[in-house]
Amino acid sequence: MRCRNLSEYSGYSAKLFARDTCEVEIWSMFDNEYSACIKLLSDAYLAYSLSELKQALAFLKVFKSIKTTHFLQEEMIMLDLKYEGYSEHRAEHVNFTSDLSRYIIMAERLDTSIGDLLSYVTSWVNGHIFVYDQRLDRHLNGCHANLVVSS
Ligand SMILES: [Fe+2]
């Protein structure tokens, strides 16, 4: 079974998570997105350190685009599994996306430094992954275990 786009998640993630191969694909997709985002942040830091400020902002814009898609995917899975932490988790995504958009515009106008923007993004990503995403990961692992036991 393949599950590479959003429409394939909708409505049957309980079945998806009962299948090891598909679960691996979902987490492998998430891992690829995490890796891409970490690489983009690293590239943005490097560009910033070389005073290539436009390039640093360009990396951050691509980062924002990937995160936006990733957030939607996470939110669809949370909804599908009736995850009790959905509202709080989604609010984190919405607030970050809104703040990031505003800070990118401010950095383009030189109203804030790109260094401060990079620090903000790095801090948020670390906090989010180690609190909200790990909480969701534990929930998904529980769903998977229950499905395997009851099938
Ligand atoms: Fe998240």
Image: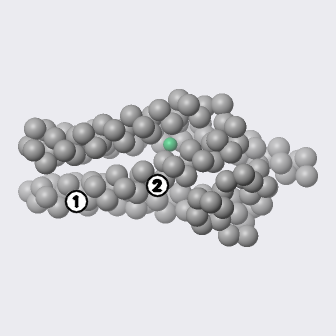
Left or right: 109 as drawn, with respect to 137: left
Left or right: 29 as drawn, with respect to 126: right
Q: Residue at x 22, y 59 (%)?
A: 58
- Residue 70, compared with residue 138, is above or below; it is below
- Residue 18, compared with residue 130, is above or below; it is below
Q: Position of residue 81 (x, y in %)?
A: 70, 42
**Mark 1 — residue?**
58
Dot 1: element: helix
Q: In which quarter of the image is residue 25?
A: bottom right
Say what amino acid the circle numbered 2 marks.
Thr
The reply to whether dot 1 and dot 2 touch (C-beta < 8 Å) is no
Q: Where is residue 63 in the image (x, y as percent from the top left)?
A: 34, 55
Left or right: 61 as drawn, with respect to 139: left
Q: Position of residue 93 (x, y in %)?
A: 44, 39
Location of the N terminus (image quadrant): bottom right
Q: Which residue is drawn at 85% across and 51% down?
A: 148
Q: Which of 100 and 117 is in front in this view?
A: 100
Does the image show residue 42? no
Does the image show residue 141? yes
Say what amino acid the circle numbered 1 marks.
Ala
The colour mode here is: one colour
Left or right: 88 as drawn, with respect to 9: left
Find residue 145 and name its label: none
Q: Quadrant of residue 136?
A: top right
**Mark 2 — residue?**
69
Dot 2: element: helix
Q: Total label count?
A: 2
Which residue in the rendered view is the most extreme toward the bottom?
1
Q: Which residue is drawn at 76% across and 50% down?
A: 14
The verdict on label 2 being within 8 Å of ligand 1 is no
Q: How crowded is mark 1: few (under 14 residues within 10 Å), some or many (20 or more)?
A: some
Q: Residue at x 66, y 61 (%)?
A: 8
